[in-house]
Image (spheres, rainbow, N blue to C red):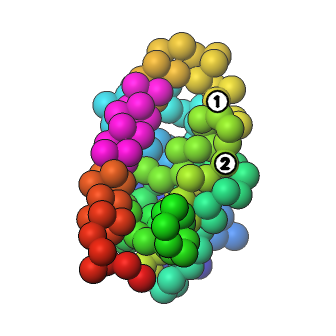
Amino acid sequence: MGTAHCARYHGAAVGDFRADGSIHPQAEAMAFVQLLENSLLFEDIDAALLKPVTAYCRTLDTAGQVVLFREGAPAEELFLVIEGTVALEIEVRPFDRQPFTTAVEAVGRGECLGWSAVVAPHRYTATATTLCDCSLMAVRGDQLLRLMTASPELGYLVMTRLTALVASRLWSTRQRLAGVVGSPASQP
């Protein structure tokens, strides 16, 4: 059981585990801080600011293609990709054609998805599906918002990065849609 936990807690050492195979809470928090620091959203943020966030994190491993969340659903968790790739798909509703779904982004190691969990109206703006076996960290959006309010430094750093992420995704989506919707040959 300890070996599986070592892989699951990326960075935990054998001595960090209890006799029952569970990880000590302090070791788990430090492993979670390392995972947060390895993400683009939280990199270079002081570990002291990140430690409270770890209380609202969980890791999950998926096998094959798994839908993490659907477009329009209430957004409760923000996800960080530890390993693997996740596709973001949106439903496109052109005025002159039938609606269709298209992939607009592939999110990989160190990247974030599900940012809607910390941005009103807290509804996912895309459907996220793992493309392969993935390891992810999920952070409860409501609690992250609470911590960001309590720590303006953390709030500023995270929201600055989220704003850049949203702008980048918007640009990328516009470019993708211009190719999908703009060409008569691309009609589904």
Q: Which of 154 and 66 is in front in this view?
A: 66
* First in sequence: mark 2 vs mark 1: 2
Q: Position of residue 76 (x, y in %)?
A: 69, 49
Q: Nearer the viewer, residue 53 or 180?
A: 180
Side of 75 where 116 appears, left or right: left
Q: Where is residue 54 in the image (x, y as percent from the top left)?
A: 58, 41
The correct choice, above or below, for 145 with respect to 100 in the image is above
Question: Alpha carbon of mark 2 to alpha carbon of mark 1: how far?
Answer: 15 Å
The residue lying at 50 percent from left, 72 percent from top is 97
Can residue 56 be seen in the rendering of this structure?
no
Magenta stretch contains residue 167: yes
Q: Nearer the viewer, residue 26 or 15?
A: 26
- Decide: few, some or many residues near mark 2? Use Cα within 10 Å; few <14, some 14-19, many ≥20: some
Report the span colored magenta: 159-171
Q: Which amino acid does label 2 sit on?
A: Arg
The main secondary structure of the magenta stretch is: helix
- Decide: few, some or many residues near mark 1? Use Cα within 10 Å; few <14, some 14-19, many ≥20: some
SS at badge 2:
loop
Instruction: Identify the residue at the far top of this view.
Output: 152
Side of 80 where 164 appears, left or right: left
Q: Nearer the viewer, residue 160 or 59?
A: 160
The label shown at residue 19 is none
Instruction: Identify the residue at the far bottom of this view.
Output: 64
The residue lying at 31 percent from left, 45 percent from top is 171
Q: Mark 2 points at which residue?
A: 123
The correct choice, above or below, for 11 with respect to 142 in the image is below
Side of 168 where 156 appears, left or right: right
Q: Name the residue under label 1.
A: 145
